[in-house]
Image (cartoon, rainbow, N blue to C red):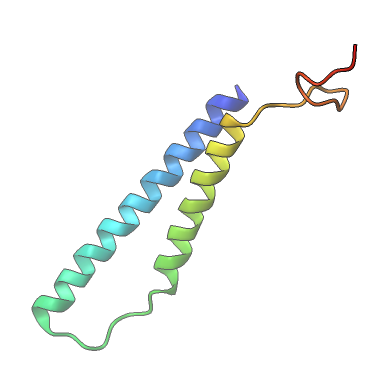
Amino acid sequence: MQRLWAWFSAFLGLVIMVIDYVDGAILGTWFDEHAVFDAPDVIGEFFIAGLGLVLLVGGVLTAVLARHPADGTAAGLVDS
C-alpha cells in the first residue's frame, strides 16, 4: 500500500508541475500579446512548482528504493 501511495504522490507532483508550467506559458503569452511590462509576483508559481518537484522526487524515491526490514538490517545483507 505504501508503494501505491508513493506512486500516487509522484504522479500528483508531476501533474502539479505540468499545470504550473502550462499556466506560466499561458500567462507569458498574454504578457507578450498585450505588451504588459508590469509582471505579477511569481514567487507563488515557483513555490507551487517546488512543491510538485518535492512530491515527484519523494514519491519516486520512496517507491523505488529497497525497504529495510523491521529489525534494522539492510535487505539482502543478513549474515549467515
State whether residue 76 is above or below residue 54: above
Farthest bottom residue in view: 37
The x, y position of residue 79, in whole percent, is 89, 17
Q: In the figure, is residue 57 to the left or right of 39?
A: right
Q: Quadrant of the N terminus?
A: top right
Q: In the figure, is residue 35 to the left or right of 12?
A: left
**Residue drawn at (20%, 64%) of the image:** 26
* Number of numbered discs: 0
State whether residue 52 is above or below residue 73: below
The x, y position of residue 27, in whole percent, is 22, 69
**Residue drawn at (88%, 23%) of the image:** 71
Farthest left residue in view: 33
State whether residue 12 is above or below residue 32: above
**Residue drawn at (55%, 30%) of the image:** 5
Quarter of the view holding residue 15 = top left
Farthest top residue in view: 80
The x, y position of residue 21, in whole percent, is 30, 58
**Residue drawn at (83%, 23%) of the image:** 70
State whether residue 46 is above or below residue 79: below
Quarter of the view holding residue 25 = bottom left
Q: In the figure, is residue 53 to the left or right of 62?
A: left
Quarter of the view holding residue 2 = top right
Q: Quadrant of the C terminus?
A: top right
